[in-house]
């Protein structure tokens, strides 16, 4: 089906890329110059790597799916920080949009042709030496009472932390799909599930039947959540970037029921090789990887 080509899930493990300063510069050089400052503003190399890979993923995916020449791709951000593609006229994909996330070792991107898409990665570790109970209580106000009960009664410290991060990345994927940013009242968002499948969402007590969610586990104690839902409740700023926020029922059902694929692992070398003028990262930039 042609519409399925607009559904992509790509993933890069940045911990397996250890570039020299020269190799890093070569990889960054394939991007438009206006993107460079958003990468070099970070002081730590790990943060710079994640920022670079995020932008490589965005440009490479847009080019491959939509077919826009690289020098015509214009990616901007809303005031809330959600990236979007400007000035595209895709007949094949009436509402093409994408979302990116990075945390820990991974950077990922997901796209949809009709529905909104949200994406969030979490590395399931506590920074520093704080106790699990102390750490999670810092965030207790972001969960509903039933979610909080499920978290604190999950079992061992590892189970509690895992349950906490599962709920957290689901909530983040939802608000990132909407494009609302950090101002959204996360305690008004409540998730229900059957052993973390058949995941459904309530907002202010109302079930949103036109939303779907998936959780994946990555190596190294990382989790990733994907949200897919109707554009009509997107933030006002993000709605302005979309071609359509209302659909006839048949078209929306087509987008909502498209298969949700597994994430495809990509390498920095592969992403760089997609850019024009035959620009490629040196062989030493190639990374090895394993499927989780």
Image (spheres, grey):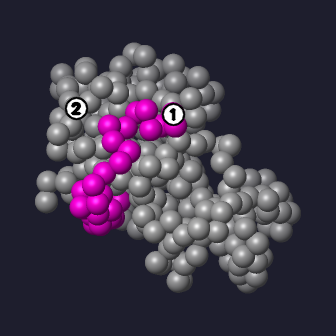
Q: Is residue 32 visible?
A: yes
Where does the image place residue 103, in percent across and percent down from the top left?
56, 49
Residue 237: numbered disc: 1
Query: Which sits earlier in the primary sequence, circle 1 or circle 2?
Result: 2
| Label 2 secondary element | loop
Which residue is at 24% across, 57% downward?
251
Where does the image place residue 144, in percent across and percent down from the top left?
73, 68
**Is residue 245 in the magenta section?**
yes
Q: Nearer the viewer, residue 256 or 136?
A: 256
Distance between mark 1 and mark 2 Cα atoms = 19 Å
Which residue is at 32% across, 37% downward?
243
Where does the image place residue 180, in percent across and percent down from the top left?
58, 43
12 relative to 87, above or below: below
Residue at the outermost top position: 33
Q: Is residue 282 visible?
A: no
Quick one: quadrant of the N terminus? bottom left
Q: Seen in the image, is 213 located left or right of residue 243?
A: right
**Is residue 85 in the magenta section?**
no
Which residue is at 65% across, 72% downward?
163
Magenta-drawn segment: 236-263
251 relative to 55, above or below: below
- The residue beneath circle 2 is 89
291 relative to 63, above or below: below
Quick one: quadrant of the C terminus? bottom left
Which residue is at 72% across, 76% downward?
146
281 relative to 203, above or below: above
Q: Are marks 1 and 2 in contact (CB under 8 Å)?
A: no
Q: Nearer the viewer, residue 199 or 64?
A: 199
Where does the image place residue 114, in percent across and percent down from the top left?
30, 50
Residue 94: numbered disc: none
Within 10 Å of disc 2 (Cα), the crowding (few <14, some 14-19, many 20+) is few
């Amino acid at each position: 089906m042609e519409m399925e080509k607009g559904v992509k899930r790509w993933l890069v493990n940045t911990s397996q890329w250890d570039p020299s300063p020269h190799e890093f510069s070569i990889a960054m050089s394939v991007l438009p110059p206006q993107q460079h400052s958003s990468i070099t503003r970070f002081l730590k190399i790990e943060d710079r790597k994640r920022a670079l890979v995020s932008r490589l993923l965005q440009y490479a995916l847009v080019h491959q799916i939509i077919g826009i020449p690289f020098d015509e791709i214009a990616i901007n951000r809303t005031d809330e920080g959600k990236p979007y593609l400007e000035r595209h006229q895709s007949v094949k994909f009436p509402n093409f949009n994408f979302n990116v996330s990075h945390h820990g070792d991974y950077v990922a991107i997901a796209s949809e042709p009709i529905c909104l898409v949200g994406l969030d990665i979490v590395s399931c570790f506590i920074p520093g030496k704080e106790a699990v109970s102390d750490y999670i209580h810092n965030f207790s106000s972001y969960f509903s009472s039933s979610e909080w009960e499920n978290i604190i009664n999950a079992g061992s410290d590892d189970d509690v932390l895992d349950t906490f991060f599962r709920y957290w990345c689901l909530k983040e994927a939802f608000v990132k799909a909407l494009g609302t940013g950090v101002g959204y009242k996360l305690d008004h968002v409540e998730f229900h599930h059957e052993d973390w499948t058949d995941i459904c969402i309530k907002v202010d007590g109302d079930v949103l039947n036109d939303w779907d969610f998936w959780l994946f586990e990555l190596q190294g104690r990382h989790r990733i959540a994907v949200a897919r839902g109707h554009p009509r409740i997107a933030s006002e700023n993000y709605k302005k970037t979309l071609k359509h926020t209302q659909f006839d029922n048949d078209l929306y059902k087509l987008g909502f029921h498209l298969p949700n694929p597994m994430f495809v692992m990509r390498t920095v070398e592969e992403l760089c090789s997609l850019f024009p003028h035959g620009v490629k990262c040196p062989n030493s930039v190639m990374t090895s990887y394993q499927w989780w």
